[in-house]
Image (tube, rainbow, N blue to C red):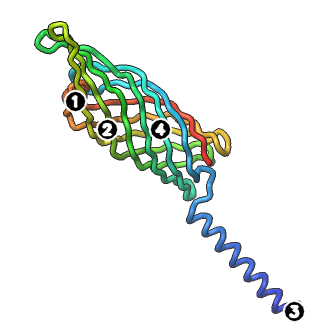
Amino acid sequence: MSLRRSLIALAASVVVTGASGAQAQVFGTGPWTGLYIGAHGGHGWNGSSGVDLTGWAGGIQAGYNLQLGSVVLGVEGDYTWSNLDGTSRLANLPLTGTVDSLWSVRGRLGYSFANSVMIYGTAGYGGFDTSVRALVAGFNLTGSTSVSSVVVGGGAELLLTRSIMLRLEGLRYIGDGNSWTTGGDGDVTILRAGVSYKF
């Protein structure tokens, strides 16, 4: 091979390598990039005046992360079963209120340290289902409603292995105020830990 052809081949190799690296940077091939699914559990309470509700909460989450340098963009959906309950009295009638489940679809924006620790903020749309029970003249009366909400929060996540991610996070569900069981402004706060498997 002549010197000219060798130089052309070398230049072409450099261009292809550089283009591949640029493509990898643009489309995100960092350790956080990928589809994941997992489970979470924790404690919740209402953040408003009215009946005090507390209890456990646990569920599943799934999402996708895209890492661009130290920045991690993501989208996540989750569903949480809960048993946040409390009692009060209305017109001298004992009432029991419960938040039965919560869900959300959120965007996530994170910053990764050393490709193994990430802090992030999250915001999106969600809701929760509530129910109320009352004993009137010996009869159990029940009712339920669904409350839509804005969901905001944040947390920290650890990439334990290539596929295992651990997290601690807090989410605030800011409801539309239509739920008796969560008080006047319809807020619910959840603090939870979770584990996810990244494919």
State if disc 2 and disc 1 touch (CB < 8 Å): no
Q: Residues within 10 Å of mark 2 (few under 14, many from 20)?
A: many
- CA–CA distance between discs 3 and 4? 59 Å
- CA–CA distance between discs 1 and 2? 11 Å
Which residue is disc 3 drawn over? 2
Q: Quadrant of residue 134?
A: top left
Question: Which amino acid does the dot numbered 3 rest on?
Answer: Ser
- Residue pictured at 67% horizontal, 41% vertical: 161
- Element class at badge 1: loop
Question: Which amino acid does the dot numbered 2 rest on?
Answer: Gly
> Which of the marked residues, 3 or 4, is nearer the chain's N terminus?
3
* Rendered location of residue 178, percent (x, y): 19, 33
> Which of the marked residues, 1 or 2, is nearer the chain's N terminus?
2
Quarter holding the N terminus? bottom right
> Which of the marked residues, 3 or 2, is nearer the chain's N terminus?
3
Going by the picture, which residue comes out furthest to the right? 1
Give the numbered dot on residue 179: 1
Of circles 4 and 1, which is in front?
A: 1
Question: Which amino acid does the dot numbered 4 rest on?
Answer: Gly
Nearer to the camera, 186 or 94: 94
Of circles 4 and 2, which is in front?
A: 2
Of circles 1 and 3, which is in front?
A: 1
Which residue is disc 2 drawn over? 127
